[in-house]
Amino acid sequence: MEQRLFFLLFFLITIIPLSCSREQDFSQPIYKELDVQGHRGCRGSLPENSLAGFIQALNWGVTTLEMDVVVSQDQQVLVSHEPYMSHNICLDSLGNELDSASYFQHNIYQMTYPEIIRYDCGSVAPPGFPNQRPVPGAKPLLSEVIETIETKAKELGVTQIRYNIETKSVMGYDEVFHPSPAEFVKLVLEVVEEYRISERTTIQSFDTRTLIEARKLKPDISI
């Protein structure tokens, strides 16, 4: 009985006033656009965070490319989900499989860019993605991804492709797997500004320190 009274009161107080309101036009959709994001490019079909994957996602009509970035010893911003060479997706410089516990041995922040590009992070089929097609290749630079995608977007007539860039940092690992939040964001935003895509870029992170630094350096950046 009490439950029936509750729903009756809810209907009288909420539904009827809404249905009778002339101020709100419910015939118009609240959201006019759907943002379709390619997670790490299109990792279900092509290697994650790879040039091939981002190009495929663009060809399929995504509106935002989601990617992760890390920093090398020589301060290059690379597109990679982990700040180390993952055994799930990478082979070492000699083409050998990596050990699952070799995080520190293949720490990207302790490696230079010439050392990094010797690893193949496109030939290994990762668990959980049986339909992914291998494409041998190294982890790309953020600048390389942006330049490639901007060129491809022009060819396709796409003018508003967006970038969702995640900084891969964790409190407690500054100067171990990545630079300090301030330095990390500075390096990322330098690339974003170089290609003049800040208005189409979102900086995201589980480490809120980098978001705070992003707003300090560029108050109007989307986070």
Image (cartoon, rainbow, N blue to C red):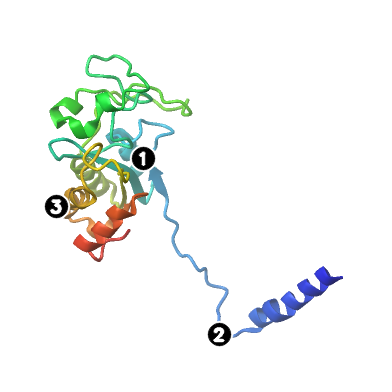
The residue that mark 2 highlights is: 23
Which quarter of the image is occupied by the N terminus? bottom right
In front: mark 2 or mark 1?
1
Tell me the quarter of the picture where residue 39 sits: top left
Asked if residue 160 can be seen in this view, the reply is no
Q: Earlier in the sequence, mark 1 or mark 3?
A: 1
Residue at the right extreme of this rendering: 1
Horizontal side, residue 164 vs residue 219: left or right: right
Screen quadrant of the C terminus:
bottom left
111 to 165, vertically: above or below: above
Give the residue displayed 33% in from the left and 21% down from the top: 123
| CA distance separating discs 1 and 3 | 22 Å
Residue at 77% in and 73% down: 6
Residue 106, x across and y down, in percent: 25, 26
Sequence-first disc among 2 and 3: 2
Element type at mark 1: loop
Which quarter of the figure has residue 217?
bottom left
Q: Quadrant of residue 92?
A: top left
Q: What amino acid is labelled 1 in the image? A: Arg
Q: Which mark is residue 194?
A: 3
Check disc 1 and report the residue beneath it. 40
Mark 2 belongs to which amino acid?
Answer: Glu
Contact check, label 1 and label 3, Cβ < 8 Å: no
Residue 31's label in the rendered image is none
Dot 1 crowding, Cα within 10 Å, few <14, some 14–19, many 20+: many
Given contact means CB atoms under 8 Å apart, are the residues at marks 2 and 3 in contact? no
Q: Is residue 119 left or right of residue 42?
A: left
Q: Residues within 10 Å of mark 2 (few under 14, many from 20)?
A: few
Observer-side mark, 2 or 3, equals 3
Residue sitting at x 37%, y 49%:
206
- Residue 22 spot, x, y in % from top left: 59, 85
**Mark 2–mark 3 distance (CA, rounded to whole Å):** 46 Å
